[in-house]
Image (cartoon, rainbow, N blue to C red):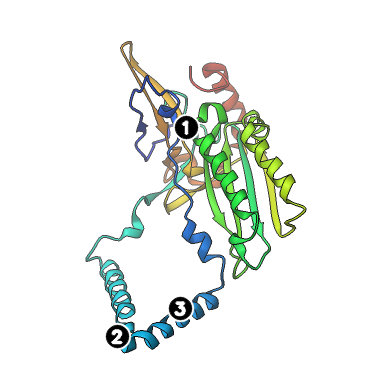
Amino acid sequence: MATFKPLVQPLILPQDDQNPKGATTIPRKRPSLSVMIQDTLTLSSWLLIGGLLQGLCLMALGPIAILPTVLILLYRLVDHLLMVFHITRNRYMEEVIQAKYSPQIPYPDGSFGNVPSREQIVVFHLGARSNHPLGIFAPGMKGLRDSSLEMLKDMYADPDKSGLLGASRWTKQEDAAGNETKTVFYFRDYDSLHRFAYGELHMNGVRYWNKITKSNPHLAIYHETYVVPRGNWEAIYINCKPTGLGDTWFKFCDKEDRNSVTHGFMRPIVDASTGILRSKTGRLSMSQIQKIEEYDEVYGESGRV
């Protein structure tokens, strides 16, 4: 069976003897505040606010006040039509991997084997919601958000300690103004999640919650934990930007020769258009536990040595 083919080039880290912790920081994207603000009000509320502002401008400046609105809408229409007809670059395709791919965990040296889902993963959901007319601007929400961002920053900054592989953020869409967000974390193992749960930053967040919860009953938080054994998980993406388990990073150290060592991070993204990864049964690998155990005997339980 052929070795899985990676579809994304590794991120090679520069040698930084002065800042070893910073040299191992996982790349991350900051959450969009504009998305959270949009979700605070219903669509009709935003339209009414826009209509009110436009009316006030017309009263103050006359018909010329509508000119900026018309010009901006015209610009956006032309811009998108040019992309639709392939005249200009489609910005929405940036970072899209135009292939059928599956996330598979690389070995510590950055290479891939040919056994699907050969390692355990831990999935942790952490969510918050504001059941308040002011949405994200409700009392206590800023503190929750600041605490969450501080924990994320700390985990991304030192993945060796935190065991974090990556995280994706989501906004619930079942309500017109949901005001509910969730972060899906992927951890290397349960011990890593346990260290996070009882770490200083998370315990500070717990103490903050215990302090404000009685006076702010409109605030809601929750979490879910899933410890998934090896050989019992699978995922497939087609023409997607890296997301979910595909938006994680695995540290590697490749000793090319005696005088050169390459450090970096690997995306777990491999070609799934052929071979065992084409089907869900193949990607689950439940029938290959014996083969995974044979790999452990050769490479060790933590991967290739």
Secondary structure at numbered mark 1: strand
Between tags 1 and 2, which lies in front? 2
Q: Is residue 79 left or right of residue 98?
A: left
Callout 3 amino acid: Gly
Secondary structure at numbered mark 3: helix
Residue 31 lies, in percent from the top left, at 48, 51
Could you tell me if residue 112 is visible in this image? no
Q: Is residue 213 left or right of residue 104?
A: right
**Which residue in the structure is indicated by mark 3?**
50
Q: In the rendered view, tell whether residue 165 sits above or below residue 219.
A: above
Report the Cα–Cα distance between label 2 and label 3. 16 Å
Instruction: Identify the image quadrant of residue 198.
Output: top right
**Which residue in the structure is indicated by mark 1?**
250
Callout 1 amino acid: Phe
Residue 267 lies, in percent from the top left, at 43, 37
The disc, 2 or 3, on the residue closer to the chain's N-terminal end is 3
Which class describes the residues within 10 Å of circle 1: few (<14), some (14-19), or many (20+)?
many
Residue 216 lies, in percent from the top left, at 72, 56
Instruction: Kindly indicate whether the residue at mark 1 contacts the one at mark 3 (C-beta within 8 angstroms).
Output: no
Q: In the rendered view, tell whether residue 178 sits above or below residue 32.
A: below
Which class describes the residues within 10 Å of circle 3: few (<14), some (14-19), or many (20+)?
few
Between tags 3 and 1, which lies in front? 3
Callout 2 amino acid: Ile
- Residue positioned 44% across, 79% down in the render: 53
Tag of residue 64: 2
